Image: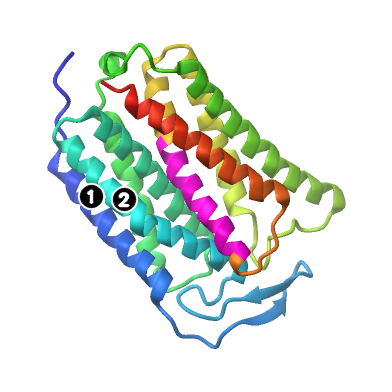
Amino acid sequence: MKEAPKVEKIFFLLILCIGLLSGVASLAGLFVGGGIGPWEFQSVGGEWVRIAGEGIYQNDSVSYVAQGKASDLVTLILGVPLLLLSAYYQGLGSFRGRLMTTGLLGYFLYTYMSYTFLWQYNSFFLIYVLLMSGSLAGLILNLKGYDYPEIKGHFKKELPIRFLSGVLFLIGGGIGMLWLGKIGASLVSGVPPIGLDHYTTLVIQGMDLGFVVPAAVTGGVLLLKGRPSGYILSSAIVVKGAAMLTAMSAMMISMKWNGVPMSAVEILIFPAFNLLVILALILLIKNCK
């Protein structure tokens, strides 16, 4: 097996900037106060929406703020430390560290892409844009650094390929059916989907259907075929999925705490997927040489 590819210093500087800016943005989302307090108004879709009225998310709905603060908390206490730690080990030549860094950069890209396009405009907009573009740049640099012909040599023969592929198919199919069912019901009834609040479109559902579902299914197929790119893509999806689903489980708890109505399917499916992907992540890391 060849020596692990060296990583340019610019990459680690980029990781440090992402960690710093993300930490600041998360702290602001959790602790910055001010505002007139909660209030209600009727959206153009006819839905009565309760606005948070406080903090940097003061113009967003109570439902979305509950989700956003849960995401900020997970990013602050898990996302940032794990990103810095995995990048450190990557710098020492660890293949596991590189895999973790790749997946976590996918998590940061997804998170701050959603913040950029979903949140009502606030004073951290440019920070979200910087984090989105920085995560994308870091992800591209990291993917270029893999020695693809040598990828399989980094994994043990005991790697449960069928199980990992099955998890990816289940996640992709489950999320796809969940969101298509929500959107389909709205198209049939002609009524805006529940939870749209005062936003213009379904940003998260669009990102999941446009990026997450195809990436999960493609990663599963390529992994089954034994393609080197399949090992990397599926690993990145598992790491990103573990981080993202942990954030979504925290969102479920936060929404329940704030009295936000949720469907039984959403309450059950995301924590269940979270446990399944964490198991997949443990098996993946365990079977890296």
Which residue position is annotated with label 1?
A: 14
Asked if 97 appears above or below 218 in the picture, the reply is below
Tag 1 secondary structure: helix
Does residue 49 appear left or right of residue 107 in this picture?
right
Does residue 40 appear left or right of residue 26 in this picture?
right
Q: Residue at x 50, y 45 (%)?
A: 245
Q: Main secondary structure of the magenta part?
A: helix
Q: Write down the region rendered in magenta.
A: 239-256
**How far across and how far down the image is residue 158, in percent?**
38, 14
Q: Quadrant of the C terminus?
A: top left
Q: Is residue 139 magenta?
A: no
- What type is the residue that disc 2 sits on? Gly
Which residue position is annotated with label 2?
A: 134
Tag 2 secondary structure: helix
Asked if 150 appears above or below 105 in the picture, the reply is above
The answer to the question of whether label 1 and label 2 lie on touching residues, with beta carbons closer than 8 A, is yes
Extreme residue in the right direction = 189
**How far across and how far down the image is residue 278, in percent?**
45, 37
Q: Residue at x 56, y 39 (%)?
A: 273
For disc 1, the neighbor class at 10 Å (few under 14, some 14 to 19, many from 20) is: some
